[in-house]
Image (spheres, grey):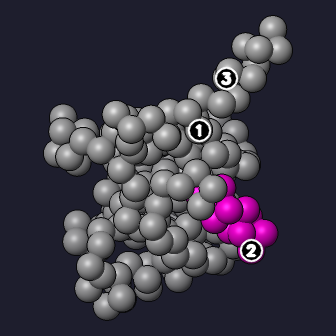
Amino acid sequence: MPALALQCLSLPQTYYHQPEKTMEMLQRILLIDDDEITNYMNMRVLNKAEIVKHIDVVTDGQAALNYLASPAHLNAAQPLDLILVDIKMSGMDGFDFLEHYQHLPETQKAKKLFALSSSASFYDLHRLKEFQDVDGHLSKPLTQADALALVKEHFGDGAPEEASDL
């Protein structure tokens, strides 16, 4: 039993380092959360998972909309691969952000968007389904295993983006 547990714990690291299955790194991720400690922890998890080259952080939905309309985002050399948005925030919360996000031009959007929440309320999860831009939901706290699984499932093992959308 202990050997099995040890084997399971090493799978993400073993998988990541297998040369024939090298996971393509994401170029950019945008974190949207009003809690600085959560942002710090999410950045640590994502950096430790070695899945992204650049992470931007904003602390509410309005700041995220401003970021997505900014020249820094629109003129970036690398695409915005992923947005992770907390659905419960002060100011403009995640749901308000999603209401505005769905009306943005595709050039301002990320390839994928996931909601983050410490709330597993049926109402919140059901409401997320109303937004076609939401690709899924992750429970807080974000873990390295969750981050690796998300990238593997939605961005593939280095496969072109077109192939993963089919």
N-terminal label among 1 and 3: 3
Q: Residue 162 vs residue 53: left or right?
A: left
Question: Where residue 26 sits: x, y (%)?
Answer: 39, 58
Give the residues drawn in magenta, as a range: 35-46
Three-letter code for the amino acid on which mark 1 is drawn: Gln
Q: Is residue 66 above or below residue 5?
A: below
| In front: label 2 or label 1 | 1
- The residue to which callout 1 is attached is 13
- Residue count near mark 3 (Cα–Cα under 10 Å), binned few <14, some 14–19, many ≥20: few
Q: From this viewpoint, is residue 165 visible?
A: no
- The residue to which callout 2 is attached is 36
Task: Judge by depth and name the residue closer to the eye, 154 or 62.
Answer: 154
Residue lying farthest front?
19
Residue 41 figure quarter: bottom right
Residue 33 figure quarter: bottom right
- Residue count near mark 2 (Cα–Cα under 10 Å), binned few <14, some 14–19, many ≥20: few
Q: CA distance from mark 3 to mark 2?
A: 31 Å
Q: From this viewpoint, is residue 44 visible?
A: yes
- The residue to which callout 3 is attached is 8
N-terminal label among 3 and 2: 3
| Secondary structure mostly seen in the magenta stretch | helix
Q: Residue 6 vs residue 76: left or right?
A: right
